[in-house]
Amino acid sequence: MLSMYPACFFKEENGYSVIFPDLDLATCGETMDEAMAMAVDCLAGRLRWLKQDGDPIPEPSPMSSIDPAAVSKELEIEPGEAFVNMVSVDVEAYAKEHFDKSVRKTLTIPAWLNTVALEMDINFSQVLQEALLAKIQAR
């Protein structure tokens, strides 16, 4: 499911600062592309963390209600060049690709099965993952 939150982008001497007023969250990047990528990562991480902890997830404000000048004043930063942009992310998809860490497992299989699987160029990790997912989904 796509989550979208407004963020204030502030141009600074060494890049961009990004503030999510609804989430008390900030990040930055040296370029606009890097700032946006960091904003997506930051947003995905915060929303996933809130969900995992069972904390309430704030509703996003309408973009039109966010005033970068007011945000900069509250944070005591120079407003300079600023704009509001929506940042969107599919938290679950992003987490699967970026946050979910693989772990090493040791397993034992018969020697003949290992030989045949190696001859067939079978990816043991992929087969195990697929089998585990099938078993989990069957429950």
Image: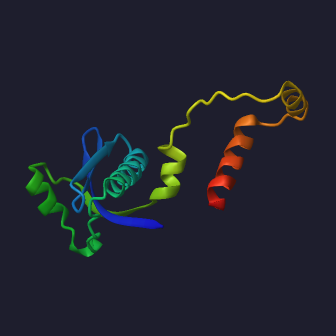
Q: How is the image coloured?
A: rainbow
Q: How many marks?
A: 0
> Which residue of the protein is positioned furthest toward the top in this rendering?
111
Please state if 69 lies on the left or on the right of 7 as rendered: left
Residue in view at x 33 percent, y 65 percent: 5
Residue lying at 70% horizontally and 48% vertically, measured from the top left = 130
Residue 91: where, in percent of width, then height? 45, 57
Q: Position of residue 104 (x, y in %)?
A: 59, 30
Observer-nearest of 71 and 118 = 118
Q: Would residue 91 be found to the left or right of residue 114 on screen? A: left
Residue drawn at point x = 26 percent, y = 71 percent: 61
Work out whether residue 133 or residue 50 is closer to the camera in this orientation and state it. Answer: 133
Of the pair 13 and 60, the residue shown nearer to us: 60
Quadrant position of residue 43: bottom left
Residue 60 as seen in the image, left or right of residue 138: left
> Which residue is painted at 14% across and 55% down in the image?
72
Q: Is residue 3 above or below residue 128?
A: below
Q: Position of residue 121 (x, y in %)?
A: 85, 34
69 or 38: nearer the eye? 38
The C terminus is located in which quarter? bottom right
